[in-house]
Image (spheres, grey):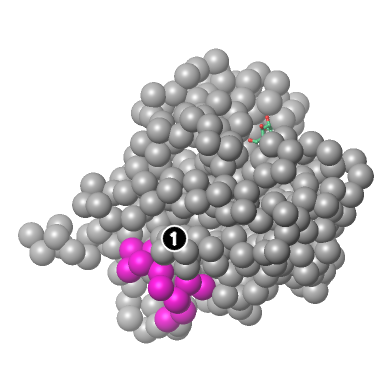
Amino acid sequence: MQKRFLSWLLSLSVGWAVLPAPLAAQQCPKVLPCDSLASPLTVTLWQNLRRYAPAGIMVGHQDALSYGVNRKGNGEHSDIREVAGAHPAVYGWDIGGLEMGRNANLDGVPFDEMRQNIQRAYLNGGINTISWHAFNPITGKDSWANTKRPNPTVRKMLPGGPAHQAFKQQLDLVAAFFHSLKGPGGEAIPIVFRPWHEHSGNWFWWGKMHCTRDEYIQLYRFTIEYLRERHQIHQMLIAFSPDVGFTDAATYLERYPGDDMVDIIGLDDYHSLRTHQPGQLIRHLEIISTIAAEKHKVAAFTETGVTDLSERNYFMEELFPCLNHSDKTRAIAWVLFWRNHDEQQHYVPYAGHPAADDFIRFTRQELIWLNNELPDFYGRLNTSEKQQ
Ligand code: BMA
């Protein structure tokens, strides 16, 4: 089916999440999330993600509601809204530091505020995705510390290892935070959890050089099983997100923890466009899109961006042509830009930024969705409002 036609058809139903039955059936065989006990709301979100992924690519931004460049957030503003008129559709958060019992994450975002902003994003109809720059349970140091040479932490965290109890205590804190993410009716807010990311590099202590394939897979599986089974967390869609360095499906899947552990076939790729290699980015996107289609999962561009935004028309001349290259690249569900820390490190323009016009043009493409263009992902209009 031509993307444009599908997109038009879907636009008729945006806000109602209703497709003509034959198309809905054809596009979306009933496939459940990898957690067989996923909450009904999580199942609804998952099925809508699968349904709408071919039609649009959602814009995501890390810490969008928490702060912007030269601006402390109050939950109402985001740099993307200041520039393009609407919030991002996907909201990225990071819980690094939570497992240490801290009140704020590694970038200074208080967890109480993060919880409120996750609630806001959910009420806006957006999607929350949570990464975890975990501190080392043995040394208490950050994710990057002691990674120049092989670091044996993962092996020690596994069942039977000397740091296993400490690791479980960390997961207990993560579970408590996830349990505290509730909507107005007390419902658990669905989240995309993206643990142990960029494991194909060596810069984090769970990276490739620091553990064997089996150890990594055990770490991943233990994390998810413990949250599901010990803590009854059933509001998670799980994202697997290697960094660059793979050349085909087999190399991408080298440390894949299993279909029962993953919903989102992700990609973190800053490298390809930073080094002006659009062909490589397209190949990566097509590989994850193909894997997602074969496995009945959803593909997402889970982290990207460049910091030299003023020197290039990054959004329309570099990124958009890659996203819009083929049906496969267009089937990516979202692209998440990293955080707007300061004038040196930011991945989307802020008010008055020289790249603002380029970004606005990007967000106005039919394929690219901000929060105000989203379908009814949580099925809210299927119930009370529709009956009135
Ligand atoms: C990195 C940088 C750091 C930050 C980390 C986790 O890319 O933005 O400043 O601490 O991500 O958010």
Q: Nearer the viewer, residue 174 or 57?
A: 174
Image x and y of residue 177, in percent: 44, 45
Mark 1 residue type: His
In the rendered structure, the answer to whether residue 297 lies left or right of residue 9 reads right
Q: Quadrant where the C terminus lies?
A: bottom left
Residue at x-position 46% and y-position 52% = 175
Residue at x-position 64% and y-position 28% = 346
Residue 35 is a magenta residue: yes
Q: Nearer the viewer, residue 105 or 304?
A: 105
Q: Residue furthest top?
A: 70
Query: Is 319 rendered above or below residue 248?
Result: above
**What main secondary structure does the magenta stretch of the protein show?**
loop
| Ligand 1 position by quadrant | top right
Count of picture labels: 1
Magenta span of residues: 30-42
Residue holding disc 1? 231
Mark 1 falls on what kind of element?
loop
In the rendered structure, the answer to whether residue 276 lies left or right of residue 17 reads right
Image x and y of residue 222, in percent: 61, 65
Query: Is 67 rendered above or below residue 119?
Result: above
